[in-house]
Image (spheres, helix red, strand yellow):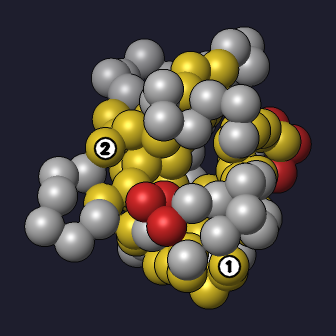
Amino acid sequence: QVQLVESGGGLVQSGGSLRLSCAASGTFYSINALGWYRQAPGKERELVATISSGSSTNYADSVKGRFTISRDNAKNAVSLQMNSLKPEDTAVYFCNAVVQLVYGISYRPYWGQGTQVTVSS
């Protein structure tokens, strides 16, 4: 199985910065895409940023220019640097990994437990 462990959430003032990290552990063959999603109270989970195995990135329009996603393939890890944070960025942030457990079988998504990010005005 695959476990994703997130860290780095917390409380920050508007305009501040936080860095989220997520590491995958367990037994698997390879990781394809990695990403971060978030869910605010009363809202659906939404994509924040993704990064492919070739390091191509994709961002939600609301975070472009403020957030940067990166990955460390040697450590099976993904990070999200969040700058110029706004109160509307407040949410639980979830790490996502698209994983192939065994060579030749389909990739499937795995999720972390989530980490709270709160931005005060």
The picture places residue 98, in percent across and down from the top left corner, at: 45, 35
Disc 2 or 1, which lies upstream in sequence? 1
- Asked if one can make out residue 87 in the rendered structure from this viewpoint, the answer is yes
Which residue carries the number 1 mark? 13
Q: Which is more foreground, mark 2 or mark 1?
A: 1
Q: Nearer the viewer, residue 44 or 36?
A: 44
Look at the picture and state if 105 lies above or below 81: above
Which residue carries the number 2 mark? 46
Look at the picture and state if 86 lies above or below 101: below
Secondary element at image label 2: strand
Number of other residues with Cα within 10 Å of mark 2, as a class: few under 14, some 14 to 19, many 20 or more: some
- Residue type at the position of mark 2: Glu
Total numbered circles: 2
Circles 2 and 1, Cβ within 8 Å, touching? The answer is no
Q: What distance separates the C-alpha of mark 2 from that of mark 1?
A: 22 Å
Q: From this viewpoint, which residue is outermost toward the left?
A: 42
- Asked if one can make out residue 5 in the rendered structure from this viewpoint, the answer is no
- Residue type at the position of mark 1: Gln
In the rendered structure, the answer to whether residue 119 lies left or right of residue 12 reads left
